[in-house]
Amino acid sequence: MNSFTQKNLILVIIILFLTQLISNISYTVEPNEILKNPKHELRARNISKNIRCMVCQNQSIDESNATLAKDLRILIRKKIKEGNKDEEIYTFLTDRYGDFILLKPPLNSKTVLLWFLPIIFFILGIYILFYHDKKSE
């Protein structure tokens, strides 16, 4: 590959990466959902960023345009208007949907495998690589 095509390829990759990055920055909160009190709206957005969309599962409800995500955003704003604290809102949602609704679930007996299996598999993978490498010599 000559240097001209390498430069073009690198440029195309950078453009695709930036396009993907920019396209992921989308806010799906509709204007009629936004609270008039800026402090309440900031609280609602912060909570929404930590709640998993049960339809999309890899997005927060703040990023998702699913109907359930919209309903949860409206519910959170309603709870804030009623004077509920953030912890009360999180408790309400986890009681209703379980710890899975949190993008960062707490470390407890139900989620211990979720937190530690990746580390165990990583250590096991490194062990297998070194053991296999020594075995082939």
Image (tube, rainbow, N blue to C red):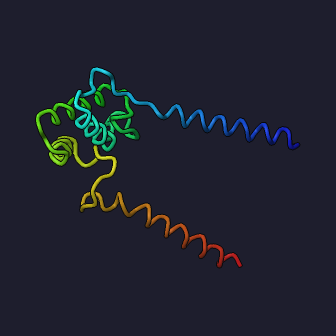
The location of residue 93, given as percent across then percent down, is 20, 42
- Indicate whether 86 appears above or below 120: above
Name the image quarter holding the C terminus: bottom right
Name the image quarter holding the N terminus: top right
Left or right, 4 with respect to 117, comes to right
Nearest the camera: 109 or 79?
79
The residue that appears at 56% across and 71% down in the rendered structure is 128
The residue that appears at 69% across and 75% down in the rendered structure is 136
Q: Quadrant of residue 37?
A: top left
The residue that appears at 25% across and 40% down in the rendered structure is 43
The location of residue 18, given as percent across then percent down, is 60, 37
Nearest the camera: 91 or 83?
83
The location of residue 114, given as percent across then percent down, is 35, 57
**Going by the picture, which residue comes out furthest to the left?**
82
Q: Quadrant of residue 47?
A: top left
The location of residue 53, given as percent across then percent down, is 33, 36
Left or right, 86 with respect to 11, comes to left
